[in-house]
Amino acid sequence: MAGIIDVPKPRVNCSMLSQYTNRPVCFVGCVEKVHPTGKTFTVSDGDGKVATVELNDPLEEELSGVVELIGMVSNKGGLTATTYTMLREDKGIPFDLELYNEALKVVHDFPQHYPFEVTSSG
């Protein structure tokens, strides 16, 4: 069985999480608050909505700014992250979460043009 990293995943924002309960997703958001245990934190999306992220292991580094998360959507509507990647500013240009959020809406409004699931044609 393929791992969560190896399977196609939809890119989602907070308002889309409930549609993908118990399914793998990719989420990009800004770290808002990290719990002192380092096992949970909150992220906001391009609409300013907030989701809770749970980790299996505590963070080993300071987490801030924009992050890309790969994980499963929990029954509570949050994310259980398998991996995260901090998206650093490139040459002083910050990641535009609002623009990213608009792109997500287009991708989800026109799935026939932007499929995220691989379908067999046989």
Image (cartoon, rainbow, N blue to C red):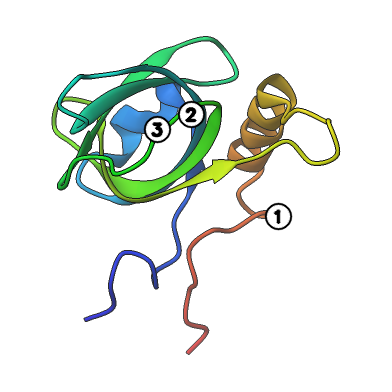
Q: Residue at x 40, y 32 (%)?
A: 62
Q: With respect to residue 3, does 11 lie above or below?
A: above
How far from the left and from the top, in percent, is residue 52? 28, 23
- Label 3 Cα crowd, 10 Å radius (few <14 / some 14-19 / many 20+): few
Q: Which residue is disc 1 drawn over?
A: 113
Q: Residue at x 21, y 81 (%)?
A: 1
Q: Secondary structure at mark 1?
A: loop
Q: Secondary structure at mark 3?
A: loop
Alpha carbon distance from label 3 to label 1: 38 Å
- Judge by depth and name the residue closer to the eye, 35 or 16: 35
Under mark 2, the amino acid is Asn
Q: Residue at x 27, y 50 (%)?
A: 23
Q: Which residue is disc 2 drawn over?
A: 13
- Judge by depth and name the residue closer to the eye, 117 or 50: 50
Q: Which residue is disc 3 drawn over?
A: 62
Under mark 1, the amino acid is His
Q: How many marks?
A: 3
Q: Quadrant of residue 3?
A: bottom left
